[in-house]
């Protein structure tokens, strides 16, 4: 049993090191895709001419605005992910604590409450991160890079 745990630990460490080594290439690819999406969205904005504030900007200003918006959206999405994972861990441990006192029914109820809270938090944060872009007339889904 101990050998299996050691093998899993070594495999996990190798995976983390490989992920760290290839991080730069992955970021470069993501940046290239983001720039392509921004260029396509700039053409769409110019073609549709629906937002006079965006139309009044030069190409350089619009490109910087869209690139910084895409970067901010990605940072906020990463923050949201970390917060939800941390909240899931807290909800799980809280459910374990309730489960030790109340049994499986208490565990299940605590997990449902934790899931409902995390769902609400996810929706709230998601709306808050799209709100500044929507105010400026920018479609956040056009800037999202998965």
Image (spheres, rainbow, N blue to C red):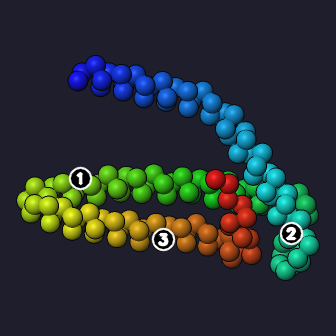
Q: Which residue is mark 2?
A: 44
Q: 35 or 67, which lies in front?
A: 35
* First in residue order: circle 3 vs circle 1: 1
Q: Residues within 10 Å of mark 3 (few under 14, many from 20)?
A: few
The disc label shown at residue 39, or none: none
SS for dot 3: helix
SS for dot 2: helix
Q: Which residue is mark 3?
A: 123
* First in residue order: circle 2 vs circle 1: 2
Q: 28 or 54, which lies in front?
A: 28
State the residue at coordinates (63%, 30%): 22
Q: CA gap, disc 3 to disc 1?
A: 23 Å
CB within 8 Å, label 3 to label 1: no
Vertical comparison of 108 with 136: above or below: above
Vertical comparison of 100 with 128: above or below: above
State the residue at coordinates (80%, 51%): 35
The extreme top residue here reads 3
Q: Which of the 4 image quarters holds residue 100?
A: bottom left
* Apparent side of residue 63 relative to residue 124 in the rendered image (left or right): right
Q: Which residue is mark 1?
A: 93
Q: Residues within 10 Å of mark 2 (few under 14, many from 20)?
A: few
Residue 138 location (% of width, % of height): 74, 71
Residue 82 location (% of width, % of height): 45, 51
Vertical comparison of 105 with 3: above or below: below
């Amino acid at each position: 049993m101990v050998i299996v745990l050691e093998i899993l630990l070594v495999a996990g460490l190798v995976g983390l090191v490989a992920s760290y080594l290839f991080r730069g290439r992955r970021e470069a690819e993501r940046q290239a895709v983001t720039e392509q999406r921004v260029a396509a969205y700039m053409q769409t904005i110019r073609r549709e001419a629906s937002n006079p504030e965006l139309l009044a900007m030069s190409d350089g200003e619009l490109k910087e605005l869209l690139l910084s918006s895409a970067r901010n959206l990605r940072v906020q999405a990463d923050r949201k992910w970390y917060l939800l994972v941390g909240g899931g861990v807290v909800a799980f441990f809280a459910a374990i604590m309730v489960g030790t006192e109340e049994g499986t029914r208490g565990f299940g109820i605590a997990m449902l409450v934790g899931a409902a809270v995390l769902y609400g938090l996810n929706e709230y944060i998601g709306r808050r991160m799209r709100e500044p872009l929507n105010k400026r007339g920018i479609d956040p889904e056009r800037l999202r890079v998965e």
